[in-house]
Amino acid sequence: MTVIPPTLQLTPGGTLYDRIGPEALAELVTRFYELVAQHPDLAPIFPTDLTETAEKQLAFLTGFLGGPPLYHERYGHPRLRARHLPHVITPKRGRAWLACMNAALRATPSIATADAQEFYAALTRVAAHMVNTPDAGQTGASE
């Protein structure tokens, strides 16, 4: 069963997935990975060919936003933090990931501003949860 985060609960317009739609979500994921591939802090932790990564991200986001549980059906429980532990994810990389997502959201005009803001707010919590390594020179103190 897919659990919809509290900020993504049903509203009069349906789930956030219903409001954004599968086509706009696919556009967003494509734009996002174009940015990731060019980002000096992110590209090193991603594969050169981002096709499978983008497919998994689209499947995950579909369910995360209240759509069909595609990721669960194809790959099982996301176990986000566990799946990301092999990668060095610093606060700097978390901010870079969010910056790429924010830029992709702004570059996807078919996603309404309010929906983009709601989506981004939910992703900020996910990005913070993925951080597993302090930035260089950081001694355990939170940023």
Image (cartoon, helix red, strand yellow):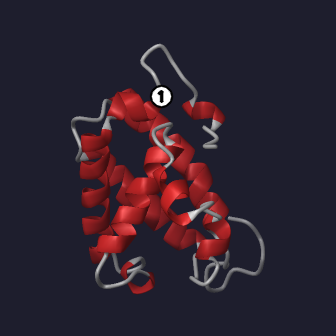
* Type of amino acid at the residue the image marks with label 1: Thr
Residue found at the far right of this picture: 140
Question: Which residue occupies 53% across, 42% down?
Answer: 121
Above or below: residue 57 compared with residue 140: above
> In the rendering, at what x and y percent does residue 44 appear?
40, 86
Reading the image, the residue beneath label 1 is: 15
Above or below: residue 97 compared with residue 69: below
Side of 35 where 88 appears, left or right? right
Question: Which residue occupies 58% across, 76% down?
Answer: 89
Residue found at the far top of this picture: 12
Locate the N terminus by quadrant. top right
Question: Which residue occupies 28% across, 50% down?
Answer: 26
Q: Secondary structure at mark 1?
A: loop
Along the line of sight, which residue is nearer the eye, 77 or 36? 77
Above or below: residue 89 compared with residue 64: below
> In the rendering, at what x and y percent does residue 97 appear?
45, 64
Residue found at the far front of this picture: 73
Question: Which residue occupies 37% across, 51% down?
Answer: 102
Which image quadrant is residue 7 in?
top right
Crowding near pointer 1: few (<14 within 10 Å), some, many (20+)? some
Locate the C terminus by quadrant. bottom right
> In the rendering, at what x and y percent does residue 48 appear?
30, 85
